[in-house]
Image (cartoon, rainbow, N blue to C red):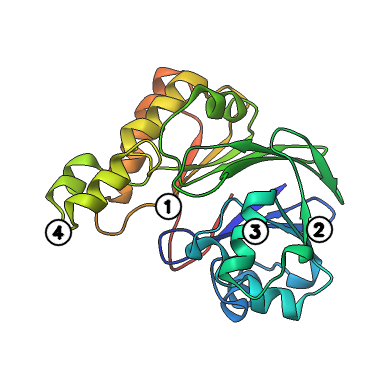
Amino acid sequence: MRVVSLASGSGGNACCVEADGGEVLLVDCGISRRELARRAGLAKIDPGRIVAAVFTHDHDDHVKGVETFHSHYPGVALYANMMTAEAIACRTGVGEDDFTLFENGQGFRVGPFEIKAFSIPHDVPDPVGFLVRTERATYFHATDIGAPLDSIGVNLAEADIATLESNHDPVMLAQSRRTECLKRRIRGPRGHLANHEAADLLRRFATPRLKTLLLAHLSQECNAPHLAEAEAKAALAERGLSSVAVKTLSQDGIVEA
């Protein structure tokens, strides 16, 4: 299995999971179709090998490219739960009937990928993270998380490769020029994970299965890669997992695991 983040952050999100046979699963489509194709090319991923796209939730930074993507690749199946499909249809030109629906907690298979969606807390209708399994590895994907719930952690415990939100440093957020309303939203139980909250999940649930950790959705104004990495590495060290490769994802470039 190969995981390539094409973009991660409030400006747009898209991630490719490539199976050993070359089939690709797209997680979210928050960048333009043209930019997705360009970045996929840099990673030596053929967009024509994408067998399905799955969606975590309906915010623009996760879905704004789906309409043009779907028009160029109509054979790629689109998967979302019912409330997310309805919300994406309201935001874009993609219709509800264009989606194949899944139920949270129930596994479904697309090509070589066995996929399970699990609920996460965020300020949208029915947001999810994903566990993606192939014959050789399990990938965990969870961003836009308001609280480090145990129900998220038990899925993290199954991962060989994990993408986990580490959005902000609380001090930098407090000192930022953002409005108090926005700060409360980000800090709130349906907002975004702080670095120490992501570290808390790792401290309690990471296992020796975990080989690579990708820290996602870092705020460009209220976080810094060295801060997010330091807290994650300290938590992993407490679990005896200092050998885990830790990388921070980028808004503007590809990062591969």
Q: Amino acid at mark 2?
A: Glu
Left or right: 65 as drawn, with respect to 202? right
Q: Which residue is mark 2?
A: 23
**Tag 3 or tag 4, which sits nearer the N-term?**
3
Q: CA distance from mark 2 to mark 1?
A: 25 Å
Rendered position, 215 above or below 242:
below
Query: Which residue is at 46% across, 19% downward?
Result: 204
Q: Which residue is mark 3?
A: 86
Which label lies toward us, 1 or 4? 4
Pointer 3 local density, CA inside 10 Å: few below 14, some 14–19, many at least 20: some
Q: Which mark is residue 217?
A: 1
**Which image quarter: residue 235?**
top left
**Tag 4 or tag 1, which sits nearer the N-term?**
4
Pointer 2 local density, CA inside 10 Å: few below 14, some 14–19, many at least 20: many
**Tag 1 or tag 2, which sits nearer the N-term?**
2
Query: Which residue is at 71% across, 32% downward?
Result: 105
Q: Which residue is mark 4?
A: 177
- Of 183 and 152, the residue lying toward us: 183
Pointer 4 local density, CA inside 10 Å: few below 14, some 14–19, many at least 20: few
Residue 132 screen position, x and y as percent: 71, 41
